[in-house]
Amino acid sequence: MDTFDCELNQQVIFGDNTIERLGELTRERGGSRVLIVTDAGIEKAGILARAVSALQSERIAAYVFADTTSNPTTEDVDAALAVAKTNAPIDLIIGLGGGSSMDCAKGVNFLLTNGGKMEDYWGTNKATQPMLPSIGIPTTIGTGSEAQSFALIAQADTHIKMACGDKKARFGTVLLDATLTKTLPRPIAAITGIDAIAHAVESYVSTRHNPMSQVFARHAWELLNVHFEACLESNGSTARSKMLFGAYLAGLAIENSMLGAAHACANPLTARYEVIHGVAVALMLPHVIRFNSTVAGETYRELYPDGDLADRIIALKQIGNLPNRLRDYPVQYTIGTADIPTLAKEAATQWTAQFNPRPLNTRDFMNLYEKVY
């Protein structure tokens, strides 16, 4: 077996209505004045109120930043940081929502404890000072941010995503409560679910995979593949709890390995044309699988021995009503074939590209974009 280093140091609380334990868990981690980072949709759905109520039951003061945008930028982090400083001293941070809110919460933790700006933490282990204890509470079924030590924060001017990672930024406690996903609309469940599936698939064949990461990825795939359709057809807790756990395991797989070319291709589509991240990943994944199959075909078959994995991804996309071609997706800006060389150049610089099992050059990225266009 390959040698590997796997650090499992999170408390994971799984089960319906575990949000009600937020107060006691916060107390256990030393929190008495907390910042909740979330978004307007979570507030409107009543989930924020459940979290605040749980904190108030333990007489914990809660201060809220509820303006996180999708694909959070440095401006989001700065705005949340201002709330924290206005209500100082904050002694614990809670990320409540999808990956955007949880990443923004990690970003605030960097700046509140170590100062500077997000660009200072682009890369790994750039924080020199201790960071605040934190709790992650996912309300979608896909990003896996709750399992990871990285915050993905986009530069406000360029929209380039910065991966800012430090083990100290990882949530010490994670609450996996499927009741929080009941209000998740079917289209969003499909988009985030496919993103989780891509995490499992890409991490399984990443050049940094190891026996432990593949255990996480394989079980994640099994849960996500089997329960994807059921979780879209019903907001009942059984299927969604399976998906929620699968998404968490896929996040663990990323944390202990890495991703690949599908995510490298997706990021420029999101940055330049505001294609939703999960949609962008779903567009690219089948083509990346086929590209990689010359070197990773047997590994893919280990993951999915029941047929062609790329075909299965396409079938799951059809179940979720996700587009197969970029030109069929309504974006804010017109995308034409003339844009492909620029997209390819940017994809080649993405951090995850270097972990793809089959090396790619700019021409390879152009071919992938041409196939999906």
Image: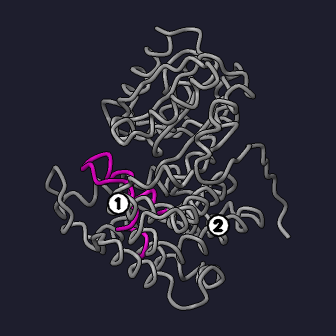
Segment tinted magenta in the rendering: 261-286
The kind of residue on which mark 2 rests is Ala
Q: Mark 2 and mark 1 in contact (Cβ < 8 Å)?
A: no
Q: Please provide percent x and percent y for residue 36.
A: 50, 27
**Local SS, label 2:** helix
Q: Rounded to the nearest whole Å, what is the CA distance between mark 1 and mark 2?
A: 21 Å
Q: At 54% from the left edge and 78% from the top edge, which residue is drawn?
A: 226
| Residue with the most extreme left position | 334
Where 369 sits versus 114, above or below? below
Tag count in the figure? 2
Magenta stretch, main secondary structure, is helix
Q: In which quarter of the image is the C terminus?
A: bottom left
Residue 347 painted magenta: no
249, 3: nearer the viewer = 249
Where 140 sits versus 95, above or below? below
The kind of residue on which mark 1 rests is Ala
The residue that disc 2 covers is 217
| Residue with the most extreme bottom position | 307
Where 343 sits versus 73, above or below? below
157, 189: nearer the viewer = 189
242, 271: nearer the viewer = 242
Q: At 61% from the left edge and 55% from the top edge, which residue is drawn?
A: 248
The residue that disc 1 covers is 280
User: Badge 1 local density, few (<14 within 10 Å), some, or many (20+)?
Assistant: many
Q: Please provide percent x and percent y for residue 84.
A: 50, 15
- Observer-side mark, 1 or 2, equals 2
Q: At 43% from the left edge and 70% from the top edge, which residue is drawn?
A: 285
Q: Please provide percent x and percent y for residue 326.
A: 24, 66
Q: Please provide percent x and percent y for residue 164.
A: 55, 36
**Local SS, label 1:** helix
Residue 268 painted magenta: yes
